[in-house]
Structures are given as C-alpha cells and as structure tokens.
Image (spheres, coloured by chain):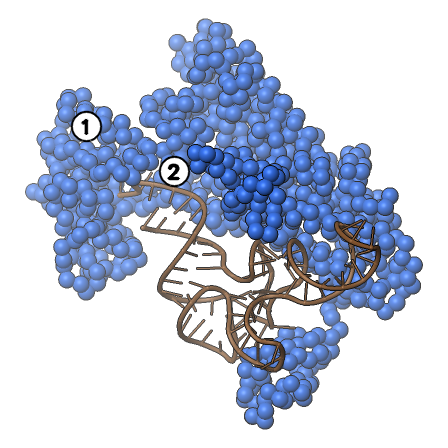
RNA sequence: GCGGGUGUGGCGGAAUGGUAGACGCGACAGACUCAAAAUCUGUUUCCGCAAGGAGUGUCGGUUCGAGUCCGACCACCCGUACCA
C-alpha cells in the first residue's frame, strides 16, 4: 500500500478492537476506575456533527484514561421515549416502537464507524421494558418513602400535544416541543417532592467544583432562594373563615410604605368571592384567559379589582388598607398574597398609579431630600439608603441590613416570622401520552389509589394502539386499563398517565453500572463505578436534566438504590459548544428566502454561487439545522475522508466549550494532514540514517509533545493538543535524526494520536513495529530532563521595549546574564551611555534595562 | 429590567504579569511538472524602500514590564423574567 486509505484502514482496526474486547468495562478493584459519560442521544434516526463532536470529546477522555491505567466505563444508550415517536405514528402510520427501534438501529450503524471506545455490551434504550420496569419499581419505592404524591394542581396544558408540561418545559408561554400557546387547566397529577430538597440542592452546588460556574449559577437562580417575612393581616368585612390574610414579603423594611394588599386570582379568598359575586367571577375569568403567553405577560397592564375588604396594618390597627385581586400575583409563590409598597416596587408603583393609591416613600438616597417619585426607587440591596419611615435598625443602612432588622423586630413583636422561600416547585411528572413509562398504580373504587405489586412489574405498554385521534391511546384502549386491585382483588383501572421522559434520563447513568441487573442497580457495581467522573453534554440541559438527576440520585439513595457518595452523581461536567456552518440563501420570486445545502454551493473569491452560477447570499455561521439547510452529514464526511478526519476536525481549532465552524476547506486540510502523517510514517519505516547529534533534539521535541498533548487533554483544551501534534509533525518531518530515533518518535506520535484519530494511530503503530494494539499501550511519559532546554534565548528590553535578544546557557546565574546583556551591541546602542537605573533579570524569561 | 459571558491578523484561535499573533485555514511566491493536481520550500498584523513606528473593543490607572490586574465605558452573544 502506498497511500493513506481510511476506507481500508478504519474497518480493519475496528474489527481488531472488537475481537480483542478492548473496550469492555471490567470491574477491577486493583485499578482506579474512571467513568466517562456523554449525554445519551434521542434516537432521531440520524447522527449529526454535534453528536460527532460530543462523542469524540468523551472518547478522547476515555481512551486517554484507559492508556493511563484506569479501568474505564464508557457506555452508550438511547433516550428513547417521547413525543416524536408518537408524532411519526400520527403522520406516517406505523408504531412508535417500530419507529424508535428502527431509528436506534440506524443510529447505532452510523455511530459505530466513528471508532468510539464504547462498551456496547451495556447498551440499552429507556423504552426497553427491562429498563422502564426498574424505573417503575423505584417509583413504588419512592411512593412508599413519601417522595411521590398526587395532588390537584393548575397545570400547563399543551393543547397540541394534549398533555401536561412542567414549568421548565414552558418556554415563553409555549410548549417546548409543540410551540403551542400553553393553557391553564386543573388536573390531578403525580409529583416528585423535589422542593423538599431545594435548600440542599442549592447548598450542594457549592461542592460541584468541576462544574461550569455558569451552570451552577443557572441552577441557583432556578431554585431561587429568598429570605423574607411571612405575617398575617387581620381583615375587616371579610367573609367568614377569612379573618386573616397571610402575606409574604422579602422587603419587610418597607412595611410602613404599604398602601394596599393584593391577592392572586387563584387565592382561596378570590375563589370564595368568585362564587358569590358575579363581578369578581368575571374579572377572575378574564385574568385566567390572559394566561401565560409571553405577549400577554409583557404587555398586560397591571389590573386589579377592589374587593371592598380591608386589612389592618400590623403596626397600627387604625390604619386600614384596601384588598385587591390583582392579575400579577402568582398563587404558587409565597402565600399568593402581598402587601403593596408602591414606592419601592415597580409593579406596585404602576398599580398604585393606576388606582390612585398613596405612594409613601420609606427611604431615599443617602442625604437627598424627600421628593415626588416618578418611578419606584429600587436601589441594590447592598447600597446604604436613608430611612424616612424605618422602624428597625439605623436611620442610614443597607436594604439587606434593614430587612434583617425588620424581621427581628417583627418576630419580637409577634408580627410574623422570618421564612426562607424557594421558587423551585415540585416536579409534575404525569403525561397524558402513550410512548412513556407507565405510572404503576391502580385506581380501585373501594381502595382508592393503590400501588401495583412489584412482582407484576413491568407494567408493559400495549402494542395494539392507534394514533388516528389526538389524546392518550392508553385512555381509549379497550382492555389495557382493566386490572385487579392489588389490594382487594376487585376489578380496578390502571393509571393511564405515563412519566415525563426526564424521569428516564434522571438515572440512566446509574443503570449503566449494571445494565442487566434484576434490580434498578447492583450495589457492588454502583459502588465501584459511581460517580460519573466526567460528564459531557450540551448547555441546554443546564437546568432541567441536571437538576432532576441531582434530585433523583438523592431519592435513589434514600430508597437504597445508590450509595451515599452518589447523591451528586456527576463529579465533573463539561458543556461543549455547537458545530456551526454558514447559511446559503437565495430568494424566490416573492422575495421569500430559499436555503441551499453546502454541497450545492461553489465558493469563489467574491462570494458563493449555485452550480448554475446564481449568486448566493452567505449568512454567517449558525447552529446546523435542517430548516436552514446548513448541515453537513457526518456519514458523507466519513465516506469521503474517513472517521478520523471527522474526529480530528471537530477537535481542532476552536476550544471545546466554544462553537466550531465546519468548513469544507478545513475538512480537506484535515484529511491532507492525516495523509501527511501517514506518509511520513511510511517513509520513516525505510529510513536507514545512522544515529547522530540530531537524535537528542528529536527526543526533546518528543518530550515536549507528550507534555503539551497531555496537558491539553487533561485541561479539556483539545485544540491545544491538536496544535501540539501539528508542531510535532513538522519537527519530525524536518528532523535529520537517525532512523531508529525517528521510529521511536513516530511510535510516540501514534500513542498521542490514538485518543483523537484511533484508526490512523493503530496503522502507524503497526508500521513502526509497536507491540499489540496502540489502544492498549500505556500513555507515554515525558522525560523531565528532556523538557529543560540547555540554552535559552532571552529578550532584552530597554524601558519595557524589546530591543535585542541574547542566548545563554539555561543555568547561567543572573549576574552573568546581566553582563552579557549589557555587552550586547544593540543594547549598548540603545542605552547610548545613559546610566542604568534598574536591571531586572527574570531567569529563563526576560531582561529589562531601565534607564 | 436582572444575571452571566465574550471582544487579539483576512478567518479559527495561542500566550504561569515577561519576545503578542503558537498551531491551523486562507492568500502569495518559488521548486517539481509539457501542464494541472498532489507534494515540498518560503512569505504572510498594519504603516514604511528602509531605519523605525503603531498595534489585543474605547478611555484611564497600577507596574521595570499589561492581551493578562484594577476602574469607567462601548459593542455583541447567551440565560432569565410579574417570584412580592
């Protein structure tokens, strides 16, 4: 063979790895373990470049750790439940199961050619009954432990998908999948008690040192801790049973600036009034209609309705405030009721202005005169302000200090108590869908809601379902829901709701440690393999998936399915950037944009054209998407250049956390580079040059390459490792060292290339007479002595400007270096006889002469 | 609004407070070739023939020395939002 031929090389080495079982994870107590996991994919049927980048990063880590002597677990599976399978069934007929398993087969076939070091023997899909049956078993354990409950709740209803959505799945008032405007409905739903863990999930973020700060911050904001005062107003002229009105405030220091109280349209008092007063009923109905759409929220003016009820100010029973029902008060935060302080809250200000309520300021800027407000004065809480109507603490103090003082004062006066509130709400998991994990409970007329018996698990989805009408096929299945009550044996009905698919992905990482166990996890396996040492995935999962998983790991620990050490399941998290591409656009005769695939474009000096010469507008890079047609199919790249080229490209240039732009010239250049490495390797096998002085320089360059590539990989800066490998290639190609020395260097090259371009690395390793598979060779170590240069070239600065350089032995004392520098011709010229005020010598770095 | 991030050649990007632009792309020149492709060898921040000067979004500061540290600002990107 005389040229680099990935089509021949790549399948051959994959076969060799398979036959040697190189990537099978083995529990080996004598070795340290390392668990690398990339977020598992949804089986859409096609892999895209984002997958290639994501899985290559994980593979680089996995292969490097394996070479460094770790027992590595690097599994793969499928996040296989969810709406698209049902949508496909609705649109094209067929069964979600067939569609899903067909897609899994196709995607697996596309992933295998990438040469990833995955232990495929652990593969599973979340729609396998063996998987979701174990999930049902855990659900029952969690139900028993009080971590799951049922309640009536106002939920987000997606009218297109005909299902309930979690708050997190509502984006800008629209369903995250369907994009339909979400409605509010009251339904009985299953919930996980994630809010019991609010404080802990927040506090534990602190310990996640190897997570991106950004993700921790996003989670902290989502949990949304606040400290405030909860207290009760006594009411005047209120209906029976409503003689007190509980409110929550984070600004109790502004109590003397109160001018009204307001309750949510969903507040029990509002609901009571609604039943007795048609005007209230109409107002409340209107508030609900406005609902949650984003336009409505942004443009909706603050509206309220005076109930005629009044409350007494807690500090002065003569002082009465009106009670409004207001459209901007949320029932599920705090108590669903507030007191309004218009001077220091923009919403309250707008409300008070509209309804002609007083706006008494409580504090003002330090030293300023009291003045009429044109908007609410809301300074940062750490800024000192001057209190006019303060009642606790100093006259001049920060908002934060005043809040603390006010809480202490109120508690001493028995007016309420300090409480900590969270924005995070319990996780509603009921979905009115077919393609999900059935919730394993039974509804019995006599016994109520009864958990299914574990021996009856898994509760399997029926195969004979249709999707010709909207709604849940389980609901209208003729027989599936009929069953015997696990408690009394009488005829009963199965729950037809299935679980949110985020439940499926909240524990798959644990299942990978024992994918075929008859229990959700196996204690010994989980104990050995957990935690995930390096988790890699998209930033889009910063909140939902990662927060749910953190909760679920705690719930699994409480129910005995995970060891205590695994309650934070991901030791380190890395969020990678996207793969982007230019967009090519023309316009049709109506001026609408028409997009074109990259392979239909010809680039030239001035711009781009279609093959028929039509000019094309080039729009800057954006995430690859089918609708913009700026996609490159990994399969085409592999067919044209081989998997190693695809892998090398996505690792090069851009830092992994940033987006990388796919360009055809870059892909071609990558392929050329790999061919060049192959060619050099090929030539070296025949190099008969005798050992000589250049050998040591090559050995130095090799040590340098080992150090730089290793540092790049360990610091998640793969682009720097790639750069170091380019530099090493250039050095090796120009080296005049002896044949043996070159072959030694080339073997190290193969070892260093192995994590990134494993097929080519094996080929080179074999060419240079390496023993066994390079995938099983130990990671090379840099000889520290070779990393230290004999001589160094130091820049000489005069007054901070570089004017000359001197080359001196690396270990020369500073005093000697000074002499040499000052004797330098260029230095003498620039000093021009002026006295040297100061001389700075930083060994190995720089010399600065100050005159 | 609030929170976070990023600004360095034509482009992607390097740079423990110590030679700014490593490495790659692109471009240009040369070699090989009848020619092209491939390959190899150079050059490539800007201004300038040169000597030299300027230069890391802007303005200021600290320092012998600042892309890096501090302060103010500008631009863009991301997240988030009636959470009392």
The circle on residue A698 is none
Kindly give the residue lying farthest to the left in the view shown.
Answer: A318
Any part of residue A527 in sight:
no
Drawn side of residue B10 relative to residue A651, left or right: left
In this structure image, what is the colour of chain A?
blue
In this structure image, what is the colour of chain B?
brown
Percent across and percent down for residue A758 are: 74, 44
Any part of residue A433 in sight:
yes
Q: Nearer the viewer, mark 1 or mark 2?
A: 1
Q: Chain of mark 1?
A: A
Q: Specify the quadrant of the image occupied by residue A847.
A: bottom right
Drawn side of residue A781 relative to residue A825, left or right: right
The residue pinned by badge 2 equals A424
Q: Secondary structure at mark 2?
A: loop
Residue in the image at 69% along x and 50% along y: A669
Residue in the image at 33% along x and 36% along y: A294
């Amino acid at each position: 063979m005389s040229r680099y031929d990935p089509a021949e090389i790549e399948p051959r080495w994959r076969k060799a790895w398979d036959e040697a079982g190189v990537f099978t994870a083995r529990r080996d107590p004598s070795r340290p373990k390392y668990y690398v996991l990339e977020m598992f994919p949804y089986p859409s049927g096609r892999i895209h470049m984002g997958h290639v980048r994501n899985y290559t990063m994980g593979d680089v880590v996995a292969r490097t750790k394996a070479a460094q002597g770790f027992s590595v677990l690097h599994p793969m599976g499928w996040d296989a439940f969810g709406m698209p399978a049902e949508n496909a069934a609705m649109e094209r007929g067929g069964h979600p199961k067939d569609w899903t398993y067909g897609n899994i087969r196709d995607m697996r076939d596309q992933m295998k050619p990438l040469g990833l070091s995955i232990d495929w023997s652990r593969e599973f899909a979340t729609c396998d009954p063996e998987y979701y049956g174990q999930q049902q078993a855990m659900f029952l354990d969690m139900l028993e432990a009080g971590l799951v409950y049922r309640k009536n709740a106002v939920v987000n209803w997606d009218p297109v998908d005909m299902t309930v959505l979690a708050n997190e799945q509502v984006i800008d008032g629209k369903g995250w999948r369907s994009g339909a405007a979400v409605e509010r409905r009251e339904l009985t739903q299953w919930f996980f008690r994630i809010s019991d863990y609010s404080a802990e999930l927040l506090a534990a973020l602190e310990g996640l040192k190897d997570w991106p700060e950004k993700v921790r911050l996003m989670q902290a904001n989502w949990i949304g801790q606040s400290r405030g005062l909860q207290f009760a107003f006594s009411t005047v002229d209120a209906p029976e049973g409503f003689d007190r009105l509980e409110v929550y405030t984070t600004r109790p220091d502004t109590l003397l600036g109160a001018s009204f109280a307001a309750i949510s349209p969903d507040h029990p008092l509002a609901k009571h009034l609604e039943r007795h007063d048609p005007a209230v009923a109409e107002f409340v109905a209107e508030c609900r209609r406005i609902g949650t759409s984003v336009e409505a929220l942004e443009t909706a003016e603050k509206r309220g309705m005076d109930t005629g009820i009044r409350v007494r100010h807690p500090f002065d029973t003569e002082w009465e405030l009106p009670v409004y029902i207001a459209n901007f008060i949320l029932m599920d935060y705090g108590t669903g009721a507030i007191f309004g302080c218009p001077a220091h809250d923009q919403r309250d200000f707008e409300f008070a202005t509209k309804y002609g309520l007083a706006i008494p300021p409580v504090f003002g800027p330090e030293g300023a005169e009291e003045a009429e407000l044109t908007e609410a004065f809301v300074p940062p809480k750490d800024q000192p302000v001057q209190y006019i109507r303060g009642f606790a603490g100093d006259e001049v103090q920060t908002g934060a200090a005043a809040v603390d003082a006010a809480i202490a004062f109120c508690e001493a006066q028995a007016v309420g108590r300090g409480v900590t509130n969270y924005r995070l709400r319990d996780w509603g998991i009921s979905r009115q869908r077919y393609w999900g994990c059935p919730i394993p409970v039974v509804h019995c007329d006599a016994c109520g809601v009864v958990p299914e018996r574990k021996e009856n698990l898994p509760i399997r989805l029926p195969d004979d379902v249709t999707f010709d009408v909207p709604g849940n096929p389980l609901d209208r299945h003729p027989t599936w829901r009929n069953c015997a009550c696990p408690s009394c044996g009488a005829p009963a009905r199965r729950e037809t709701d299935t679980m949110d698919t985020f439940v499926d992905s909240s524990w798959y990482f644990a299942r990978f440690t024992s994918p075929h166990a008859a229990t959700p996890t196996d204690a010994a396996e989980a104990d050995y393999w957990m935690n995930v040492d390096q988790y890699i995935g998209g930033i889009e999962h910063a909140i939902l998936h990662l927060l749910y998983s953190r909760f679920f790991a705690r719930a699994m620990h409480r129910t005995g399915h995970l060891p205590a050490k695994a309650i934070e399941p991901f030791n380190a998290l890395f969020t990678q950037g996207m793969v982007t591409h230019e967009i090519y656009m023309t316009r049709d005769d109506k001026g609408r944009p028409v997009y074109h695939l990259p392979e239909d474009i010809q680039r030239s000096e001035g711009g781009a054209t279609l093959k028929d010469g039509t000019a094309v507008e080039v729009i800057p890079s954006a995430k690859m998407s089918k609708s913009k047609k700026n996609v490159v199919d990994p399969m085409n790249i592999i067919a044209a250049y081989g998997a190693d080229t695809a892998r090398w490209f996505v690792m090069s240039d851009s830092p992994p956390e940033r987006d990388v732009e796919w360009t055809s010239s870059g892909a071609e250049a990558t392929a050329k580079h790999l061919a060049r490495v192959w060619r050099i390797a090929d030539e070296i096998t025949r190099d008969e040059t005798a050992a000589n002085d250049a050998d040591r320089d090559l050995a130095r360059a090799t040590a340098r390459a080992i150090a730089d590539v290793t540092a790049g990989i360990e610091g998640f800066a793969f682009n720097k490792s790639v750069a170091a490998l380019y530099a090493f290639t250039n050095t090796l190609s120009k080296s005049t060292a002896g044949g043996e020395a070159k072959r030694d260097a080339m073997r190290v090259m193969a070892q260093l290339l192995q994590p990134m371009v494993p097929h080519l690395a094996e080929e080179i390793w074999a060419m240079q007479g390496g023993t066994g598979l390079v995938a099983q060779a130990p990671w090379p170590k840099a000889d520290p002595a070779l990393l230290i240069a004999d001589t160094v070239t130091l820049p000489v600065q005069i007054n901070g400007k570089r004017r000359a350089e001197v080359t001196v032995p690396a270990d020369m004392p500073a005093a000697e270096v000074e002499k040499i520098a000052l004797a330098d011709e260029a230095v003498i010229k620039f000093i021009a006889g002026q006295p040297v005020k100061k001389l700075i010598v930083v060994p190995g770095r720089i010399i600065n002469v100050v005159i």
